[in-house]
């Protein structure tokens, strides 16, 4: 694990695209990739391991989590360049009024151009596929809380049990005083 925190920072990372049909499987250095239909892969068994050929990019990502002790993967969000947005969309994003795009002020991030984190674009990234040595900027703890709320809302995660547990803990602590 890296010495400095990764969560909340923008880092360069190798990010593959999600596999999509037609699926191409690596067949070794002597052969071209083999196309395989999903049905045939399912019939082979749930635990069968495949080496997919997928396109990817080295791109900046906004890291959301630290790698766990058990797995050396973390979650990140892909970024969208402002040149892909209309002037009206850019204004909305800069005002943090688009729940699916989180504005990254250009004066705080060392990126080639102005960007926004795509709230709905979660990507798993292996720790070895991320530049842990240098950050391109970082969100504040308040910005991370707002972003976390947006991610929870975007994916519809049910957090009621966590909230109820925290309320009980606070009530117990208050009673003990």
Image (cartoon, rainbow, N blue to C red):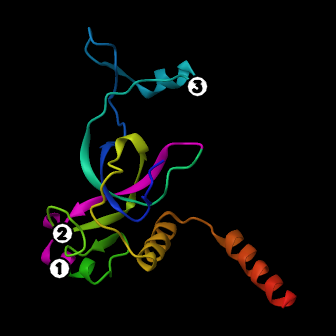
Magenta segment boundaries in residue numbering: 70-90
Q: Nearer the viewer, residue 158 or 36?
A: 158
- Asked if the residue under mark 1 is in contact with the one under mark 2, i.e. CB atoms within 8 Å, the reply is no
Q: Is residue 121 left or right of residue 59?
A: right
Name the residue tied to disc 2.
114
Task: Estimate the x, y position of residue 97 in percent, counting from the top left.
Answer: 32, 82
Q: Which mark is residue 128?
A: none
How many marks can you see?
Answer: 3
In this rendering, the label closer to the viewer, 1 or 3:
3
In this rendering, the label closer to the viewer, 2 or 3:
2
Task: Estimate the x, y position of residue 170 in percent, counting from the top left.
Answer: 75, 83
Q: Is residue 119 left or right of residue 70?
A: left
Q: Is residue 2 above or below residue 93?
A: above
Name the residue tied to disc 1.
88
Task: Estimate the x, y position of residue 87 in percent, counting from the top left.
Answer: 13, 77
User: Disc 1 to disc 3, how far (Cα)?
Assistant: 48 Å
Q: Secondary structure at mark 3?
A: loop
Magenta-colored stretch includes residue 7: no
Name the residue tied to disc 3.
47
């Amino acid at each position: 694990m890296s010495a400095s925190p990764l969560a909340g920072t923008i880092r360069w990372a190798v990010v593959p695209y999600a596999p999509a049909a037609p699926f191409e499987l690596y067949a070794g250095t002597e052969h071209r990739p083999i196309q395989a239909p999903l049905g045939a892969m399912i019939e082979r068994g749930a635990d069968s391991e495949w080496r997919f050929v997928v396109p990817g990019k080295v791109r900046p990502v906004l890291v959301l989590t630290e790698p766990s002790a058990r797995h050396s993967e973390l979650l990140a969000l892909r970024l969208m360049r402002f040149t892909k947005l209309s002037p009206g969309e850019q204004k909305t994003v800069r005002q943090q009024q688009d729940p699916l795009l989180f504005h990254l002020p250009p004066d705080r991030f060392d990126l080639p151009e102005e960007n926004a984190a795509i709230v709905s674009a979660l990507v798993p990234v292996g720790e070895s596929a991320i530049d842990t040595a240098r950050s391109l900027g970082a969100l504040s703890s308040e910005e991370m809380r707002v972003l976390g709320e947006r991610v929870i809302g975007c994916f519809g995660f049910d957090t009621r049990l966590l909230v109820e547990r925290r309320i009980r803990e606070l009530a117990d602590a208050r009673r003990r005083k």
